[in-house]
Structures are given as C-alpha cells and as structure tokens.
Image: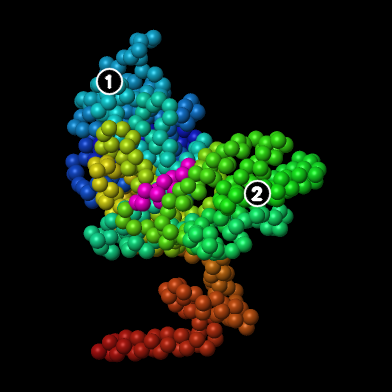
Amino acid sequence: MELVYLWVEEFKNIKQIGFSFSTRFKVDFKLNEKLGYKQIQIEESPEQRRFFDNKVDNVTAIIGKNGSGKTNILDLIGLRMEERKRYRNAKYFMIYHHKDNMFSIEGSDFKLVSSNIEGYPNQKGSFDMVTEPYSLLLEKQKGMFKYAGFLQFNEIQYNKLNIFNLRNIFREGYSKHGFKPEMDYSNFFQRIYLNPTYIGDYAKYKLLTHFNRLVPSVSKEQGLVFNLNEKVLVKVFPNIHVVSFQEVKLNLIFQKSFFRKETDNQLPITMKEKFIIGFLKKYFYYSFESCTELIRVAGGDSEKIEEMKTEIESFKNLGNDKIYLLDLLKIVYSYVEKENLDYANMEGYVDALSKLLSFIEKLKEEYFSEDKISIPVGREEEEVVADLLCFIDEVKFDEFDYLNNAIKISIEPMSSGEEALINIFSAMFFGIQHKINSKNEKAIILMDEPDVFMHPEWSRVFLSEVFNFLETVKNEYYSYQLIITTHSPFIVSDLPKDNIITIEKNPDKGLCEIVHLNNQEQTFANNIHSLLSNKFFMEATIGEFAKKKIDKVIEVLNDKKNSTLTLEEEREVKAIIDIIGEPLLKHKLNEMYLLKTPEYKRAVLKDQIRALNQELKMLESDGND
C-alpha cells in the first residue's frame, strides 16, 4: 500500500499541480476532450523494480529553495482533520493504492473527480451522501473508477495506514506536542504529529535502551547511531537559580552536620538525602524570592514580606528536613493565594514536587552525587527511571509547569549533531511503537528538512541510518514510505531522479512550479559538487564573500585596457590566489596572473616565437623536398 499521487487544485501557493510519489504507477490528471472532463489516468509501470531494502518500499525527496512550497505539500498530506477544516477553500485529492485494482481517494471539492467515479451515492439528505472532505474506496476499471464504499466504514482498509507528520519546527496551527494523534473524528487515514523538540526525555531513554539491545547483533557498517556501547548517561540536575540564601534563616538538621551523631542511632546522611535536601533548599529559596517579588510588583508593603519571613523562621523542624521544607513551601504558597498573586493552583506545585521526590527516592543510591543524578542507560528500561522521566515530561509539557522547570535532564555524552539525530529517531520510535489501531500495516513518514541542524556527515548518512533503524523495529509496521523535504545534496545523491520532485517559486506570480530534471541528469551516487552546482541548492559552490573576492580578481586580470598590473594590484591579486583551496581554480587564476607580468609574458612570447620558427623551418624543409 502506498500514497501514489497528490493533485492540488488550490492550496496556499500551489495551484493546479500534480505530484507523483510512486515509481510503480504513472498518474496524470488532465482534460480528456472527448469525454469533456479532466480524467484521472493511472498506468502501472512495465518495469517493476525494488530499489530500497526490506521494510522501506519507497522514498521521495522534495527539493527547492525556501518559499517554493515544499512544506505546503507536506502540510496538505499530513494535516490532521482538526487543522484541515481550517482550510475550507482548499481543493485537492490524494490517491492511494491498496492492492491489485483497489485504490482509495481522500480530498476536498468532490466536483474535481466526481466524473471519474461511477456509482457513488449522491442523493441529497441521504446518510450515504458524499460530504466534504471526502474519502472513498475505489475499484479501478478501464478508464474509470467504480465506487466501492466509504473508506472510514471499511475497518480493514481504513486501519491499514497511518501517516506520521514529523517536524523539527511546527508552524502556526500546530500545537506543541511531541506525539499527537487525531482528536476529532476523521474519515481520512489517521494523521499523527511527531515533534522531536517536544517528544520528551522518556522517548529518548526508550530509544537508547533499544539501541543498546542491538549492539551485539549490529556491526559498525550498519550504522553510527547504534554503536553507543552502553556508555550513555541520563543526568538529572537541579535547574534553580537563587540570588541569595540569606534572606530567611532555616532550621535544617542537614546544614548543621553532614553526619548525625552516632548516639541518635541513625546512619550517616546518604548522598541521595544530600541531593534531595539540597534540591529542596534551593527550591524553597527560589519560591520565597518569587513570592516576595510578586508582593512588591503588586504594590504590597514590606510588612507582608516580614510577616511571611517571621512565620517561616518560627516554624519548627520536627526532625525531617524534607517534610520541614515542604511545609515551608506551603506557607509561601499560602501567601501567594491570600494576596491573589498567581492564578495557578498552588496545591498543584506542592503535589508535583512531592511526586517528583517520591520518584527520585526510588532510584538507586549509586546514581547520586551531591548536585546531580547520573543514570547509566543499559539494555532494558528501569521502571523507576521510566516513571521519573515520564512524570517530568508530563509536567513540563502541560499547560502549567508545576515544577517551575526546576529539573533539567541531559543525555551525555552527545554532540549537538548526535542529539539532533537521536531526537528525530526518538520521535519516530515513540510514534511507530504506539498502537494507533488494530492493523498498523503501513506507515507513511513525512519529514520536513530533518537534517537542518545536522553536521554534513550526519546528513550524508541520514537516509542509511533511517533504513537501518526502521529495520530494527520489530512487530510494528510491515512497511514504510518516506516523503522528505530537504536542502541536502547528500540525501538527493542517495535517490534515483525518479524519486525526486524539484519545485521552484515563480518570481512573477509567487506560485509553486514543478521543474523537470534533464533526461541525462542522474542524481543517484552523483558527485556532490555537481549536485551543489545545481540551482536548486545554490548559485555557487563557494561562499558569497569568497565569490565576490574571486570575481574581483578575475575582473582585474581580464582588464584588456591594462596589459600589466600595478604593484598594488599585484599584491592584492597574489594574496587572494595564494589562499584559494580549490586546485583547478587556483591554477587557472595563477596562469591569468602570470600573463599580466612582463617577465612571464616575454617568456611566453619567446616560447611562441620559438615554436613558430620551428614550424616554419619544417614547412620550408617540406617545400624544398
């Protein structure tokens, strides 16, 4: 099963353009003058080849400069029904192939395709009437399609496909959720949003344990991200900044001595206890400072602050620092509520903090130091670690962050490029492992410039890593179709030109246009410099500043009015030529430079005269014979 074709009659800057996403079918939508309407023509390609490995059926890359419409194409394919309904004026249809002659169609503005479909219900007021947006099952017959039912009512076909819309940055209209399936009823295939930025730390932890389980059976040749060798740590830090610890005096047992007296019949304070008390102490001072600042901003007098301070300092510690500090926080929050300084629920802050501490207390003692928790990532998830990370994610991405962003999670050691890659794979892994429906047969994954933050080497291996990764995810989807927008020539060089859609923005109308590659222009395994020189990537293969410097050198060397260079020109030109890294360009400019120097020019002319004299002697010798 696959997405075969998208026709856009009107959506944003795209008008009356068709996009093909299958190498198995040739699809056209054009006017049939004999029939008097635009006809959908689908022909199966005579040559059926499987280019990609195993689970990945097909990959399409959409390339073009910013503003050409790449993201708009993914929007139209990937929008959930809730957002799709906002674009009531959009007109389009998408065709999917199921099996043999069975297809399905999703779209808006049924009039576009109605003449191509026989037997569809059209009685007004009927329950079976086609409504907008529509989705139908179709059986392909000669030159026509036969209506075979509504897609959403055929559970077997409807549940075969899910479409994952994966974005690093979601535009307006997209909510900030790492994983968000359809919330409203939808008669389209299920669309699920995946945002690596908001996928959360549990998803990364889950992925890393998955990778660690693969290490014994995965060679280095199979991918870079799999070779972590269980050396990765999840680190938990307090993320609290306090201006002063002196404003209010606390009656803490822990601060009097790191070790309790042996006569107390108690063990020395553990590193876990030190971490918890240290964290709570910082959290209290942060909350106290915030409350006093709110009172001042609200125009309250200093007496209120002194009253709160007195109540805190007179509060007795009954022998448990943790309970004591939590009780002090309740005093602070009671003043916030009394003065109506915050519209949030103050009990929510105390509850969230108490839950956080209950998860932290269950962690192993050896993970703790005084100022951080270092959790080694093994081959299996630890339940208490998973619970802690899930809770932090839940609070962090809620409408109110009841932890005040007081805890920071870091996965180390990782470069920014590795982190970007892990974020993307975490989002994919979390999404495709989530049971959306009973079938989960095929997944279409949409990726909008996934390599945008990556080092060139990560971009170069990206598609190979995705293929390897999807192969390792067992018992989920049988197959995958990838549709990627990109500026990366590395990704393009991994694909045949039939798998690439090239678009550009019409400079006069601002509309998206398809540009067909030259028949002789192959992309697969093409030289990276050749691809970079293509106008779809860049106007030149060097930086603009360097290009201007070199253009200036060429202009000086090509000046026919002056046969030689001034001393200043010589110095400037030679200084630029000497630092050029590209050898062919450097050699050519050196030749041009030397031709502008009198000594070299005389030597060249002498060589030319010598060669001409030699040629003349040969001619005269031939004439005498």
Marks 2 and 1 sit apart, C-alpha to C-alpha, by 73 Å
Front-most of residues 425 and 600: 425
- Could you say where residue 62 lies in the image, as x and y percent from the top left? 39, 46
Q: Could you say whether the residue bearing mark 2 is in a helix, strand or loop?
A: loop
- Give the mark nearer the N terminus: 2 vs 1: 1
Q: Which residue is mark 1?
A: 149
Name the quadrant containing residue 42: top left
| Residue tagged 2 | 316
**Based on the displayed image, in which of its 4 quarters is residue 249 positioned?**
bottom right
Q: Quadrant of the N terminus?
A: top left
Residue 152 placement (x, y as % from top left): 32, 24
Q: Is residue 491 magenta?
A: no
Q: Residue at x 66, y 42 (%)?
A: 331
Residue 56 makes an appearance in the image: yes
Quadrant hosting residue 164? top left
Which one is in front, 154 or 601? 154
- Please give the label number shown on residue 136: none
Please indicate whether residue 436 sits to the left or right of residue 354 in the image: left
Q: Residues within 10 Å of mark 1 (few under 14, many from 20)?
A: some
The reply to whether residue 169 is in sight is no
> Which residue is drawn at the image coordinates 53% and 62% (left, top)?
263
Query: How many numbered discs, if any?
Result: 2
Residue drawn at point x = 28 percent, y = 48 percent: 473
Q: What colouring does the structure picture have?
A: rainbow
In x, y percent, where is residue 459?
A: 39, 58
In which quadrant will I find the C terminus? bottom left
Mark 2 or 1, closer to the camera: 2
Magenta highlight on residue 389: yes
Please tell me which residue lies in front, 225 or 267. 267
Which segment did they paint magenta? 381-394
